[in-house]
Amino acid sequence: MGSTTRPELKGTFGVVSSTHWLAAQCGMSVLERGGNAFDAAVAAGFVLQVVEPHLNGLGGEVPIVLWDVTRKRVEVICGQGPAPAAADIDRIRDMGLGEVPGTGLVAACVPGSFGAWLALLRDHGTWRLADVLEFAVGYAESGYPLLPRIVDTLVMVEPLFREHWPSSAAVYLGGGVPRPGQRFHNRDLAAAYRRLIREAESSARGRDEQIEAALRSFYSGFVAEAIEQHCRSEAMDSSGTVHAGLLTAEDLNAYRARREDPVIAEFHGWAVAKCRSWSQGPVFLQQLRLLEAYDLTSTGFLSVEHIHLVTECAKLAFADREAWYGDPDFAPVPLENLLSSRYADERRALLGDRASLELRPGRPAEQEPRLPRREAQNVAEGHWTGTGSQSLGAVRGDTVHVAVADLHGNLVACTPSGGWLQSSPVIPGLGFCLGTRAQMFNLDPEHPNHLEGGKRPRTTLSPSLALRDGEPCLAFGTPGGDQQDQWTLEFFLAHALFGHDLQASIDAPMFHNRHFPSSFAPHDSHPGRLVSEPMASGVLDELRRRGHDVLETEPSSLGRICAVGIDHKTGILSAAASPRGAQAYATGR
């Protein structure tokens, strides 16, 4: 690989990579002050809630995959909250809706991120709650420089805030639309953090007991009460009409962040660990299974054959995601069969030299697949259309990431998301918004991912941890919704198969397909669509000749991958972050 945009960082003490430089530096500060990788990740995670409120927040969710050297196994903490107990298909239809709206209060699930971050801190970290929250409180209270993308977002939603979401206008538009780079404060959010700390410290002296007390304050105390009150009011959403929310204090009181085993697949001496089928994580592993029979290195990195094979395998894996994935507590997801070599052999037989234009889920264990039946969604014109990146044009992402490795050998990847400022009104007095993840459910009662109370939606959030020869050596992830397990797969292939270092693997031209339905309302699809940054001369033209609907984007426009690594033979730690978007940074020494 040729020159990179920045060096792959190497050191022996600790490394952090995140989608915002302030989060990365705060995480590194924790390591410098004696914290471990998990303390650093939690501190960085709360900073991300403050400085990237258009991409994640305290009302959102976070899946975490980690290796703790004291336990010597990969573990997952599921910070994806479930749907409210009152949420079901009939309830949505009684509102006159054909789908769960993409914005507003109806789409809110229980906020899972606070529970997951505190579970990580309690069970794996060493710091006290007040100490890890110090950085986030400081930026919320004293201000931080506002990203241009946040301003772009606020410009687009200003009419919505002023006309329909006054609590959001009060926080974000009090002095008019702010300027890029302006020092911006969210004092209500700072006060919420401070109250969580104060109530924790006043009720307990021990570190773990204070963390438990903070969890009670959030899930059965003042935060839960404010959320229930907020959801009783009606708010405008993407349907063009007002609806109240379904979340109650009882829903929050019943929530606990879940510890789970990951799902793991082997690939050319590597083992990759992902979250289970409540995320889209297993599609990464299905793609590896399909690709393992090919000698990709002989095709040449980013050659026509390379891009074609990866794209066609992705189409098959994501078709299975559409048909089979859902919360395994509620639906029998045939994951073992989907990840078997025999099934991959059957699916591989469908691949040809030309681009497929069909959505083709398979029949694991001879079961018939079920693609969700969807009705045409009522989506109002103007600033209501869609959600997330699709409604906001140039504003990409909707998610953030932090990965950390420390000198002890601890490794963690976290992909926080949800609670976007543009998607749900601010909870008065708390300074943050609820998430809208329930839009990822469907209303087809026969489908594994249909809406049910207490059920986790099948999300796009997908952190990764990879092992080599049984040793954890790589933690990575990216924002990007449906693209997460396409961009990170290509990054992994560049590193694991083609031998490029972490930074070169991130910097290499990226591509993805939009062949399958989007996970976000209104769930549009573009059969055969291949989105690609510029490639070597003739590559994209040949892909068009093979039937791909190629959309060439600007250079360095796809993905915001963050990664950290450990070389167990040398004890060298490494880190890299994407230059795309001009805000992700890695740090370390």
Image (tube, grey):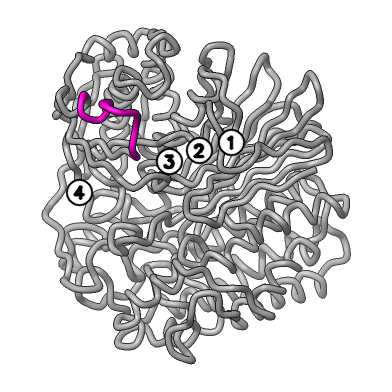
Instruction: Kindly indicate whether the residue at mark 4 contacts the one at mark 2 (C-beta within 8 angstroms).
Output: no
- Left/right placement of residue 542 relative to residue 156 reads left
- Mark 2 = which residue? 507
Residue 123 lies left or right of residue 157; in this view the side is right
Q: What secondary structure is the magenta-colored segment mainly?
A: loop
- Distance between the alpha carbons at the discs numbered 1 and 2: 6 Å
Identify whether 333 is placed above or below 54. Answer: above
The residue under label 4 is 524
| Residue in the image at 26% along x and 41% along y | 552
Which residue corresponds to the image point at 59% horizontal and 57% vertical from the top-left?
20
- The three-letter code of the residue at mark 4 reads Asp
Can you give x and y, in whole percent of width and height, for residue 72 in the image?
Answer: 75, 26
Numbered label tally? 4
SS category of the residue bearing label 1? helix
- Mark 3: secondary structure: helix
Q: CA distance from mark 3 to mark 1?
A: 17 Å
